[in-house]
Image (cartoon, grey):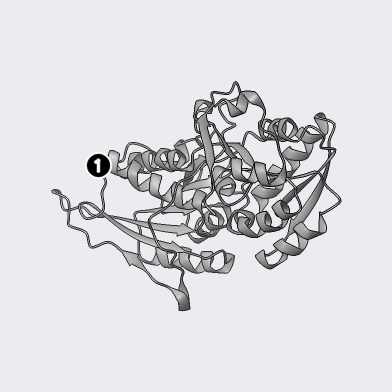
Amino acid sequence: MKKKILSLTLALTMAASLAACGSSTASQEGSTTTDTTKETESTTEAAADGKVYKIGVCQLVQHDALDASYNGFIDGLKEAGFEEGKNLQIDYQNAQGEQANCATIASKLVNNQSDLILAIATPAAQACANATSDIPIVVTAVTDPAESGLVKSNESTETNVTGTSDLNPISDQMDLLVKLVPDAKTVAVLYNSSETNSKIQADLAKEAGEKLGLEVIDATISNSNEIQQVVQSLVGKVNAIYAPTDNLIAAGMATVAMVANENKIPVICGESGMVEAGGLATYGIDYYELGKLTGAQAAKILNGEAQPSEMPIEYLDASKLQFSINKEVAEQIGVEIPADLEAN
């Protein structure tokens, strides 16, 4: 059944470092590595000066937010004069959610002597950083690069890694939860316990929820096969679920929604792609725009204008935050949309 999504851009008064997500549909097909590799390398015509730049891409998994960040990256490079078929050759690899594949992909991209590597999501970024300290790496869809061990600090990386953060406005998302579910008392945070940046978001959600008088509990998974069972275990125990921008949860959002919506448990999400997949609502950043910002960083590196070690981690401007709500889900689970949100 086609989802009816209402989206609007909201300017929020908050630190520029707090920006979250939105997404669009990517055009590439998922490819992976080693035995299941389907390598996609562009046939590239050399630029006027004869230089063709080789960019290797390691993406953790295929879902709307990460796909949108990749598409934005390509368009950001194009706006800066770097384009496939002219002066750019891209080797796109998708690890299909397997961290072991990330390490294999990273080694391949290094061995192919890439001029620059794009790593999408934290495990992919960590694998690439472990594989080389020489080739410039730009990362995106990473919540906290410093906490993830990718850079010395987000203000001064001092490594071959730079990029963009998708840190969510988590306190605003918890405020949204209370606004849409005013009687909520107990909220579960659903996330992958083995992903560093998901744990960071879970801790921030607990802090924000407790300030709102909520009891916030963990609901953790370690692989996609556990999603249905874990969500089912929350029935009758919680009034709502908060699902941050966790890659396993985002990829398995249809399963989350199947159980939660059937049992009338509202799910507030970390990004709009998860809302489209059956969640209730979110405030978030636009992952396509985040990718474009990352592409602009990569262009500066390729042009010799900057070194990753001198480039701080960047964040989208807070004015690009979006509100998205799935009206069909709201009707299904009996959530009344407040007038000020409905009006938009």
In the image, taking residue 183 as reference, residue 267 lies left or right, namely left
Q: Residue at x 81, y 29 (%)?
A: 211
Quadrant housing residue 206: top right
Q: Residue at x 17, y 55 (%)?
A: 46
Please tell me which residue is depicted at 71% across the width and 45% down the height of the picture.
333
**Amino acid identity at mark 1:** Gly
Disc 1 marks which residue? 81
- Secondary structure found at label 1: loop
User: For the view shown, which residue lies furthest in the left direction?
Assistant: 48
Extreme bottom residue here? Answer: 35
Query: Label 1: how many residues lie within 10 Å, few (<14), some (14-19) or many (20+)?
Result: few
Residue 157 visible: no
Nearer to us in this view, 102 or 4: 4
**Split into 4 quadrants, where in the image is the C terminus?**
top right
Q: Is 102 left or right of 222, judged from the image as shown?
A: left
Find residue 14 and report its horizontal and vertical position in percent.
Answer: 61, 23
* Residue 249 x/y as whole percent: 64, 55
Q: From the viewer's perspective, is residue 257 above or below residue 98?
A: above
- Along the line of sight, the residue nearer the viewer: 216 or 339: 339
Q: On the rendered structure, is 182 left or right of 257?
A: right
**Residue 159 versus residue 59: which sits nearer the camera?**
59
Q: Quadrant of the N terminus?
A: bottom right
